[in-house]
Image: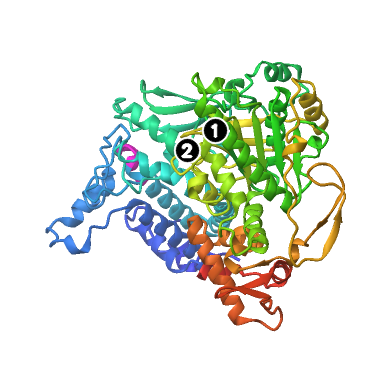
Amino acid sequence: MNMIPAAVLAALPGSGGTGAPGDVLEGPRRILSAVTSAPPVALAALAGVGLLLMLLTSKNSGADVTTRTARPRWWPFRLLWRFATGAPMDGRPRTDATWTHNATRSVREDSRAATRWDHLPRGTRMAIRWAFLAVLFVILYAYTQDANTTGNALATLGTMAACAVGLWLGYVLTDRAVTWRHRRNWVWPLHLALYARLQLPRDASLRYLKVPPHFTEITGDMLRVELPADFTGEGKQDITNIITTKLALQDVSFSFKLDGRNHYLVARQTPRPPAKVLFADPAVRARVESAPESAPMIGLSHQDRAVSIDLDTESPHILVNAGTGGGKSVTLRAIVSQFLHNGAQATFLDRKRHSHKWAYDIPAVHYCKLLPEIHDALIALGEEGERRNLIVDEWRGDDRDAPVGPRHLIVFEEANATIGKLRRYWTQIRTKNDPKESPAIEALGDLMFMGRAVKMHVLMVAQYGTANSLGGPEMRENFTTRILARYSANAWRMLASDVPMPKRTRHTGRAQVILGDTPYETQVLFMTEKEAYEWAMSGAPAPAAFPASHVPAPRPHQDNKPGMVPEGSDGQPYLRVVRDPDDELVGIVEAVRSGVLMDLVREANERWPNASADELEKKVVENVRAARKADRPSNPFPEPRGNRGQEFLYRVGDLKNWQANRPKATKSKAANE
């Protein structure tokens, strides 16, 4: 079927029509006749090309309606001149681009970012506009010659272009979806800190910041910042400090390229910590052997540097804050075994009972598994600390040389749950004449404040080191050394608010060792349990952690069902009352602080990631109390089993069952809240 109308065929030369070959109107007549009788598909394609041309050529051409004045008489000729010469259609330059050179800076009066089109040389923009006009003219001319072939060609090219655009949009949208969190948390804050220094608009495109999502795992050239063409190097130190602080970089060197056409800054990462640090490696073992007695090796950092904390000169106590699977027990195993090798004593307060089985049979270790043992051991340790403190007070030489006895480590496992349980245990056994505060927690506080002279050091472990879970804010401040692994944003803000938070990693054994205000990315030393035991036993012998005469007498529980425990604190069998932990009574606030309702705390942390620890605790308590009032039939809230003043007390096991069976909050509900 011939798609060209008969009127057009009649106008063609040699077709018997009236059109003469020399007629000057012959070409326009053909085009007009072909367009008016063209099929809809071809007209739609031509309209699309024209619309695209109009959008491209009128980019940023509209002036503000509020400031538009009466147009001059010859404005059509001005528009034609601007279009033909590549100038902005409103006559207002956006950049300092010339006829032959790209722009170096935006000159917009509204301080908004100029587009990539505005950065092109004026000659290039003119060439692009004329090229589009030429393409449009060629298409129209080809259509007058063979409408059928031209229409098919346009349809094919349009399909190919649509597929290409679709693939490109799919790639862009997928990349944006995958990296949006990285751009929100790292790239955008870096831009907000840099744009004023580089004299860029606030809404400038972030393409000048080449920060890959995995920049924390790159060794060598890890990121690149494109600099303006007129950047002269002024304020280079400020720029590098901003990048180091905002991205929490460590051991990074910077190089500037300011010669030639392209200016940029490159950050180069020194060699990162090794993937593994094994005690079985002879080189690692040699470094452990050479470590000072008071500063065992924790692991290796950048450039294969050993990381250690001197308990005599830097920090007498260490806090390990890590989520599940963060390597808390592995970290303590490496530290404590080295101290035991050097002749120290250790007391393990392990409510979980099995965190450090390797230390069970070491003579210099006193291992407390039961809550009464932990309570009594802390009181005895407090008395030992007072004894040593008196010796230091009477000593007239250097405090570090006072004859206080061997170094003593107090390894406090799972502080989140144990501190709260110690408080509840004391409320159950105390008499009317006893103080309200637990003497065990008081003794722990005394040990924290005695300092390094008595050579008694607390190594505390927590999954979420809030002030309440560690015995109070004043006790938490004594941990000037903090080891964080698998940490959340809330945990970092709570424990290291003055230090920029590095990007988190799931690398096994990787931790941030923070001494004061300086973080050290560290691959923690790994010892097997057998290696730790053999290393602890192979060093200088130490006396038993508690001589027989100093073993604290066990305190019986009250009003509990009796049970048999095979060994007591002195290693001899005896009868002791053992209470099931799930039968203990707690209030709602205490249940949140002690970790009984840890699932609720984790959900609240995900729902309100920017909330402080106190705000988070308050929200969880409010949610639990609201659930108690609602009392859903499908999962009724537990009945109170007692009261403490005006506060109801609930059985721990009942709260755990309610927490496990409650309906989970939906994402939409979390978003609305």
User: At 77% across and 29% down in the image, what residue appears?
Assistant: 532
Q: Name the residue that disc number 1 marks.
A: 389
> In terms of image quadrants, where is residue 13?
bottom left
Q: Is residue 128 magenta?
A: yes
User: Hey, what amino acid is under mark 2?
Assistant: Leu
According to the picture, the residue beneath numbered tag 2 turns out to be 247
Between residue 172 and residue 41, name the one nearer to us: 172
**Up-down relation of residue 666 to residue 142 (above or below):** below
The answer to whether 121 appears left or right of 604 in the picture is left
- Please say if 659 is above or below 545: below
Secondary structure state at the residue bearing disc 1: helix
**Front residue of this view, candidates 545 and 144:** 545
| Residue 355 location, quadrant | top right
Region rendered in magenta: 119-129
Provide the major secondary structure of the magenta segment: helix
Magenta residue check for 510: no
Q: Is residue 278 left or right of 179 when viewed as pictured?
A: right
